[in-house]
Amino acid sequence: MKTILIANRGEIALRVIRTCQKLKIRTVAIYSEADAELPYVKAADSAHLIGPPPVSQSYLNIAKIIEIAKSEKVDAIHPGYGLLSENSSFVKAVEDAGIAFIGPDADIIRRMGDKIEARKTMIEAGVPVVPGQESEAADIEAAKTFAKQAGYPVMLKASSGGGGVGMVMCEDEQALTQHFDSTKKRSEAYFGSGELFIEKYIANARHIEVQIFGDKDGNVYHLFERNCSMQRRNQKVVEESPSPALSEEARERLISIAVKAAQAVGYKNAGTIELIVDEHEQAYFLEMNTRLQVEHPATEMITGVDLVEWQIKTAFGEPLPINGQAEIKSSGHAIEYRIYAEDPKTFYPAPGLINNLLLPEGDGIRVDNGYEAGNKVTPYYDPMVAKLIIHAPDRQACIEKSLQAFESLTIEGLKTNIPLFKQILHFEDFAEGHYHTQSLTMMNKGEIKS
């Protein structure tokens, strides 16, 4: 393997480039007119302008990406996360061009990308799922019928979407009626399908996911769990591993469910099983992400595994550098913070010019950043500026080291959510590990102690 094209941008493109450099693999980047000055473009061995800023005219232009890949004679394409990473049509186009795709095959991506089909697959495999509507393409009357039977509140979700804009909680029938059409239109705009489905809302739940990895010999390994319950607008902002305040019995059960789910589809390469865990530690399958996660560094910090390296080796049929599950060890505690250009109170994006950027350094401190001083965070893409990942021998030491790291982190020229993280780190429920998916919203409203 000599050359890999990275079909993505920003920090994840730079992250993949770092591992390729370690493996002495040549890299090809693509960039839009808005991203021409970003560090990943300069770090790649070769870079190609792919189009104007809107993703539909640049990073989602499959034909253009394949054209560049062929011109560069690349051996493989790494999709990163987001954008085309879970687009089965893209995977098929890559494979048809005679190029390896670094990820699972197109059929698994298609099956797990359709949330209704994924639910059915997991039910058939005996994996617990959140009570929901199993029929295809729910209409408003079917949704009302399910909600009456299950009881409010319920979650209305885009069948082809992930978190964030693809879901909305409805507390009563009036809200369900009000949100149904708008969620359908948003789903069509963002995910290319207006299909929706409905699930029972699990109150005060924790969002916990298990990192899994499948190899060419049919083995499925786990790399422990991450707690991703600190969320705003149904999107994660803090992730930690291992999960605090989870009994060993529940942890073993979650891992067992995740491995069973991955085995049910014959999974290969890196993936994540997302679970919702209720107040009684009952876990339910939410979805399977058939790609690298934004929060994968937290797992890398506690296991010492380079997941991108494993992805690349697996894609080319090489064996993983382990002889079994027992060789994957967890050590210490890691917390990842997603630093966004956004208002720390309203959570609205706040794009702008980064005048000054100073990053913390030291043992157990990792920063995956997509920008440097002088770059603009534009309104065209997700406004994440960087990820700060802290590793320490235990959770308390990790929190203390996090506070020190934030004191030496400087981003000037635009608003960021750094003040929010400092607030979270002093938040009583976070310090004790007793927080759930609504905690950040309640904390921001002053409804619980901080």
Image (cartoon, grey):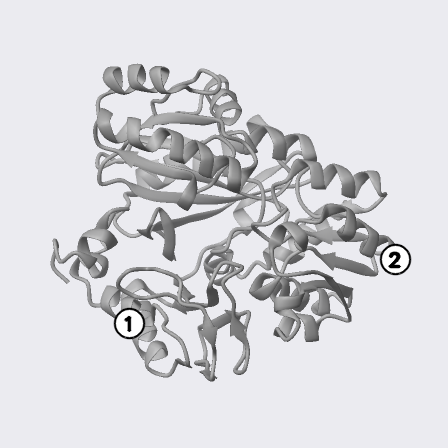
Above or below 30: residue 287: above
Residue 184 percent coordinates (x, y): 44, 31
Name the kind of residue labelled 2 in the image.
Answer: Ser
* Relative image position of residue 76 (x, y in whole percent): 78, 52
What residue lies at 21% left-to-right and 28% top-to-bottom? 172
State the CA–CA distance, disc 1 to disc 2: 46 Å
Looking at the picture, how far across and down is residue 315, in whole percent? Answer: 73, 46
If the image is split into quadrants, where does the N terminus sit?
bottom right
* Left or right placement of residue 170 versus residue 316 in this view: left
Residue where numbered disc 1 is placed? 419
Q: Is residue 409 above or below residue 447?
A: below
- Residue 71, label in figure: 2
Q: Nearer the viewer, residue 402 or 52?
A: 52
Three-letter amino acid code of the residue under disc 1? Pro
Q: Residue at x 13, y 58 (%)?
A: 446
Observer able to see residue 368? yes
State left or right for residue 237 relative to residue 266.
Answer: left
Q: Is residue 45 left or right of residue 71?
A: left
